[in-house]
Image (spheres, rainbow, N blue to C red):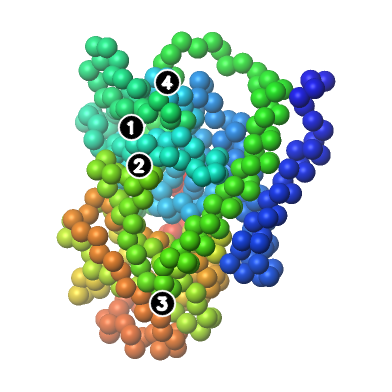
Amino acid sequence: MNASLQPWATYVDLLKAASEVELQLWEPQDEQLRAELYRQFAMNLSQGYFLYFQADPFYPDWAPFENSVFLAQPNPDAVYHYSAVNGQGTYRVSGNRGNVPVAGFATGKNMIGMANPPGPGFNNYDLDMLDIAEDGSFDVVFSRERPPGYQGNWLYLHPESRFLLLRQFSYDWGREREVKVCIEYLDEQALRPRMSVATIDQQLRELFGGYVKRLSQLCQGILANSRKSRPLHQMQLTTYPELGNGDDWPQAYYECVYDLEPDEALILETELPEQLVYWNVQVVDALWNQVELVHRQSSLNGHQAQVDSDGRFRAVLSVEDPGVANWLDSGGHLKGMLIGRWYRSSSHPTPTLTKVKFAQLRDHLPPDTLMLTPAQRAEALRERRVGAQLRRRW
């Protein structure tokens, strides 16, 4: 046996260090929350396999990253795919644009969970900045420098880049044509070799002894920082420039921490920009996971939301169904965050939040607020389930 390979129990023991995250929880004594943290550890293991064993910068392929299963705060309208890259190399990405409202690429050094701290992010690119054929087909080369004589689509690849992320945002789930892509490494390369014992040993140590703990620590750190720096139930705007957001990815976020009692509700209210490409709002739990998004209406986007007759958007966050069409289902979570996005919008309004007693909710909403019967709610949830499953997620 190769000396670098250890007994299986050695690798499993590395997972024990993740127990330190329990002390960082919002409420460490909450058994339900601790159980959900253990579930998050299992999720991290599943997600990490793709990052450590499927992803290879010299034999690239798109691996599932965040979606309706890997829930470390994905945009619920988005599906993310990850490919490892070598920033010194040359890659070609080709496929079809489809017609989802937003699609683009991000480059960076360390994905969340793969280093402490993660990042930095380098560049974000909207796919629509490329020359795209009438049938939606495109190809683009990523490299440090434009290849000599090459006149096609080219995007700069930072020499320290280790990943290329594809993200696409859907409005009308399951009905839009999604982006289809492939990625190729253009530098000369032999057939993909069998993974060595030393590499397997190293990746197991990274996955079991690093990634599982780091990803959950990062989630708790973001929540803790938000709780310290942001008053409860007060939205704040941010653009996260450290992630590479700029003119090529002009997205602004609005975020707040919430902490409710079972008999309370939050009313979110905002004006809408005169011009925008995409917007949404989502419910995140006390582990920084997106609340169940296939079987619950825990998010709303610009296609799904109902705008009131005065042109404003109002939604209700609560545990119990208030009958309001724009219900943000907390999934039973009384603590967490609300996070929303404005993409390519003419302004960035900051929504307001009003905490009310659930029994008095209707007194605080316009009289013509759209209400749903139980049958209508059931049909809306059915459409959501079907649409979520018809989307490409893997």
Q: Nearer the viewer, mark 3 or mark 1?
A: 3
Q: Nearer the viewer, mark 1 or mark 2?
A: 2
Q: Which numbered circle lies on residue 266?
A: 3
User: How far across and how far down the image is residue 144, in percent?
Assistant: 34, 22
**347 left or right of 33 in image:** left
**Looking at the image, do the residues carrying marks 4 and 3 touch, with CB atoms under 8 Å apart?**
no
- Distance from Cα at disc 4 to Cα at disc 1: 26 Å
- The mark that comes first in sequence, 4 or 3, is 4
Q: Secondary structure at mark 4?
A: loop
**301 left or right of 287 in image:** left
Q: What's under tag 4, amino acid-wise? A: Gln
Q: Which numbered circle lies on residue 69?
A: none
Q: According to the image, label 1 marks what residue? A: 96
Q: Nearer the viewer, mark 4 or mark 3?
A: 4
Crowding at dot 1, Cα within 10 Å, few <14 / some 14-19 / many 20+, comes out as some
> Looking at the image, which residue is at 33% across and 39% down?
124
> Looking at the image, which residue is at 40% across and 39% down?
121
Q: Nearer the viewer, mark 4 or mark 1?
A: 4
Q: Nearer the viewer, residue 200 or 108?
A: 108
**133 left or right of 92 in image:** left
> Looking at the image, which residue is at 55% across and 40% down?
114
- The mark that comes first in sequence, 3 or 1, is 1
